[in-house]
Image (spheres, grey):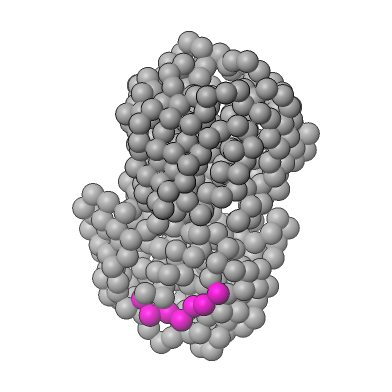
Amino acid sequence: MDKLVIEGGRPLKGSVQVSGSKNSLLPILAATLLTPEKCVIKNAPLLSDTYTMLKIIRNLGVAVEMDGNVLQIKSGNFKKYVAPYRLVSTMRASFCVLGPILARLKKAEVSLPGGCVIGVRPVDLHIKGLKALGTDIEIKEGNVCAKTRALRGKQIFLGGAFGSSVLATANVMMAAVLAKGTTVIENAACEPETVDLANFLNKMGAKIKGHGSPRIEIKGVKSLSGVEYEVIADRIEAGTFAIAAAITKGEVTIKNINVEYLSALIEKLEDAGVTIKRGRDFLFVKRTGPLKPVDITTLPYPGFPTDMQAQFMSLMGIASGISVIAEKIYPDRFMHIPELNRMGAQIFRQGPYAIVHGVKSLNGAPVMASDLRASAALVLAGLIAKDKTEIFRIYHLDRGYENLDKKLVQLGAKISREKQ
């Protein structure tokens, strides 16, 4: 098992290329199960989550070839319909194979999902949506067992306690493309990754409109074709680099991104005193003066993303004043607070709120990564901490960032990956 050792105090300078989006790729890989023909997926990030999803679809009998960041996938006439616990338990996004398997084989058995421990994330909306399409579902021994005679379009409201669900929207949308009639998803997720999946499905021959809005309409088709498709850039990785530039008083150009997808983060960074210049497909981020405290509330897109909450908390940890961070998506997603406090931060949790009292500096310490985005927050803190920071359990980091440590080193950071 590896750990990261970071020597802080070095401003980041230069340019960095953002990898493909993990949160787009994983549902798209599941969607390749909807056609027997070959699909070519470009710009696939090389992550442990990517390899896990490939293991799952290979286990179903799907042929996969990998050449760098290009994947060739051909599901053919696969007959296996079980996605087992030993694979699905490691990654929540793997649950979105349920809809495609069901659409192709009329039955599916998928283990309840695992992934990062960031609070309760039920699958009730997935089940509600698939039941509405005409599926009988039972939960047996930790597995979701689904079967149908025929999927039929329906108007479905997918609202949950904390708003829309990206993966539930994806699961229902993938099942609905091969259903008879028209499906309307109300309170659908509007995230760019949902739009990317819908664009992929439409290129395959699906008839989806309204994606990117809370109302998605899907007219079912008899079959889908194989396609060649390029995954969008990872907006969360781009945002993490933007905060890295800001927290280190650096100057970084972030390339290969859709700037529109970062609007909520950009606004908050500018409010904090960070200079940002926007291009057609890049951001230039620079900070010279002190950081101002800024309050944020995480919300579904286009609001401030929950996947940037931990990283922004690290930034506010050295702001000149008090900021309040409200987590409205996953109220328990605060496991990084005690680790940041070990480094000298002064952060206090009150329910779904974190009150951050900015300090002048952080100190290096051994810290433990609890989940993917918490890992990134600790790396950001380590970049400015005095002395050395050791981050353990970085396998969480490798789930969602392609070579983050190497990219930061290219920008001037001093980071080494060592065996524990």
What residue is drawn where x is 43% and y is 70%?
Answer: 199
Q: Could you say where residue 168 lies in the image, as x and y percent from the top left? A: 57, 64
Question: Where does the C terminus fall, quadrant-wise?
Answer: top left
What residue is drawn where x is 63% and y is 69%?
Answer: 214
Q: Is residue 205 above or below residue 74?
A: below
What residue is drawn where x is 44% and y is 22%?
Answer: 11
Looking at this rendering, what residue extends furthest in the top direction? 387
Q: Could you say where residue 164 lies in the image, as x and y percent from the top left? A: 65, 61
Q: Could you say where residue 38 lies in the image, as x and y percent from the top left? A: 26, 71
In depth, the one of 338 and 20 nearer the eye is 20
In depth, the one of 392 and 139 nearer the eye is 392
What residue is drawn where x is 41% and y is 26%?
Answer: 12
Question: Where does the N terminus fall, quadrant-wise?
Answer: top left
Q: Is residue 4 left or right of residue 328?
A: left
Q: Quadrant of residue 309?
A: top right
Q: Is residue 42 left or right of residue 235?
A: left
State which region is magenta.
Answer: 204-210
In depth, the one of 98 and 374 nearer the eye is 374
Residue 56 seen by the camera: no
Q: Is residue 209 above or below residue 115?
A: below
